[in-house]
Image (tube, grey):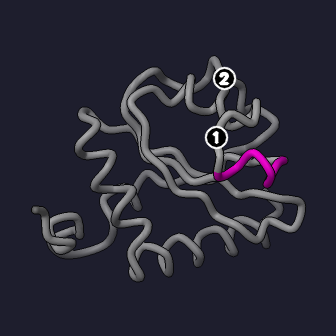
Amino acid sequence: MADTRDFLPKAGPPPAEKSLTPINQRSMLSQNLEERPAAYVILCGDKASYLYKGSTRNMAERWKDHQAGRVARTENRRPVRLVLVEYFDTYTEARRRENFLKSGVGRAWLKARVVKWQTQGT
């Protein structure tokens, strides 16, 4: 059985911090998303009070599922807004990143970025 420490980065900032940019929702169309493993974060609801963190083998299809209400956790929290997508070579790496984002350190890191993006008007 895997220990939670297996999913945390060894040292330094989270792996994707150097290339991290907020997603402009106006330009976010399904065809812009790649069909490869990814970890992602969705801002749910009108008040944007719920952050859904997930991973998938095919980001384009998964985003369509969220928008159509076919995902149990987000179907009643629509509208949904994609705020972060990080692509990986394997699904295992994407799952590790998702687990990091769900950890205390990952949530704090993510919350700081989402608040920053919201105050910048993105």
Q: Quadrant of the N terminus?
A: bottom left
Dot label at residue 30: 2
Instruction: Compare marks 1 and 2 and give the one earlier in the sequence.
Output: 2
Q: Quadrant of the C terminus?
A: bottom right
Dot label at residue 114: none
x, y percent for residue 104: 41, 82
Residue at 21% x, 72% y is 4
Q: The residue under label 1 is which amino acid type?
A: Val
The stretch of residues the image draws in magenta is 73-78
Name the residue nearer the viewer: 115 or 38: 38
x, y percent for residue 72: 65, 46
The kind of secondary structure element at disc 2 is helix
Q: Quadrant of residue 11?
A: bottom left
Dominant SS in magenta: loop
x, y percent for residue 60: 56, 24
Q: Is residue 99 magenta?
A: no
Residue at 76% x, 30% y is 68
Q: Return the residue at label 1.
A: 71
Residue at 17% x, 74% y is 5
Residue 122 vs residue 51: left or right? right
Residue situated furthest top in the rendering = 31
The kind of secondary structure element at disc 1 is loop
Q: Quadrant of residue 86?
A: top left
Q: Nearer the viewer, mark 1 or mark 2?
A: 1
Residue at 43% x, 51% y is 19
Q: The residue under label 2 is which amino acid type?
A: Ser
Q: Is residue 77 magenta?
A: yes
Residue situated furthest left in the rendering = 1
**Tag 2: Cα neighbours inside 10 Å, few (<14), some, or many (≥20)?**
few
